Amino acid sequence: MGERKIGLVATIAVAVVVFAGASVALLIFDPRTTGADALRTGGLAAGSVVALYALWLNDRRRRVEEKRQELDSQRQELDRQRYALEQQRQALEDRRTDQDRDRAADERFARSVELLGNDADQVRVGAMHALAGLARSNPGYTQTVLDVLCSYLRRPFEHPKWTPASELPADPGEWPEAGPELEGERYVRQTAQRLIQDLLPSTADPDPKIYELDLTRAWLERFNLSDRVVGRIAAYRCRFRYTTNLSRAVFHGPVHLRDGVFVGRIRAEETRFRHKLELRGIVAHEPVGFDRAEFHGTVEMQEVRCSAHVSFERASFHTTLDLRRTHFDGGVDLRMREPLPSVSLYHTEVDTSVHAQVPDDWLLVPQTDTNRAHLWVHEVRQNPSRG
């Protein structure tokens, strides 16, 4: 500010000197010049000095502004670099945190899996709950935890309570008894089944994730997937005790129950099967209910033997139904919704001494001197390749 004042004073002084000098010089050296002309010429000279100062001042101000803008650009660039470095530091910190969390989850998972081999049943139950908690806090572990729980259920297990009543001795005193170790293991397996059910998404979820189950050769008790969303299920040669409840579930993958033994009921009311349902070779000792179920894939029921009532009342089929060599020994209700499926029949037998209901154009052809009948369907309904 001081320099500006000094420059202004100096400019005024020079302008005054130039004004006076120009005016006097004209009056002295040019006799023809009047006093007014001399004053006017001196004023122009003095104004030129002031104008030159103003131009210099503006040029200086421009250079200062350009310098300031350059400094602002450099400061902004430094701020941008500082922000980028801060983002990188935060990303590294987040990655380190994720790695620490993943490492802790991996260690927790490994410890829990190791404890599944503990001799104490309460320790195994605690390990299963720890695995389920890990899956809830880390959804990426859910399928892995389900695989581990299913693997535990696939371990060899023999329990006398899975023996059908028809196969037990007539004298209850001769029925086999289970020791405390078997009962403890049975409780652990029930816990595994309950946790599997809890980890599967519900049909009420708006966008459920699909998980798969592999339960081949497992012994299951009160197996319950009602109101759950599941992908593929592999449950070959399983043994089911008490009610197996699949009601209102949605299966987005094929369901394989081939060669299973059901000591209890099968409930699958209003269940939706998006892919194939395989029941080939199962033995059902209690009622089987598929009332109002939806089948969008092939239903394979070849070589099935049902000791109790089987119902498909108001079930809807969008593909074929295979009933070859199936025996309905406890009655059957096949009053399905229209349109009826294309059906494959061969030695399909129904015990007519108990309640049996079939569609209007399906026939029960009695066998000679027995209470059994062969199920027959008009050619329009029957799959011509199966006979």
Image (cartoon, helix red, strand yellow):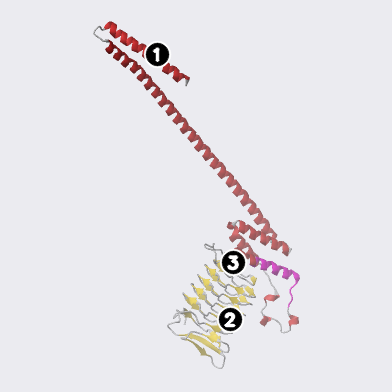
Q: Would you name the residue on which mark 3 appears?
A: 214
Give the left or right position of residue 51, taking residue 126 as reference.
left
Please, what is the three-letter code of the amino acid marked with disc 1? Ala
Residue at x 53%, y 88% (from the top left corner): 373
Q: Which mark is residue 305?
A: 2
Please, what is the three-letter code of the amino acid marked with disc 2? Arg
Tag 1–tag 2 contact (CB < 8 Å): no
Query: Does the magenta stretch mainly form a helix, a strand or a loop?
Result: helix
Image x and y of residue 304, in percent:
56, 79
Relative depth, front residue between 19 and 377: 19
Image x and y of residue 65, in percent:
43, 28
Let me know if residue 137 is in the magenta part.
Answer: no
Residue at x 72%, y 61% (from the top left corner): 123
CA–CA distance in space, label 3 to label 2: 24 Å
Crowding around mark 1 (Cα neighbors within 10 Å: few <14, some 14 to 19, many 20+) is: few
Tag 3–tag 1 contact (CB < 8 Å): no
CA–CA distance in space, label 1 to label 2: 124 Å
The answer to which of marks 1 and 2 sits earlier in the sequence is 1
Q: Would you name the residue on which mark 1 appears?
A: 13
Residue at x 35%, y 12% (from the top left corner): 18
SS at badge 2? strand
Residue 117 can be seen in this image: no
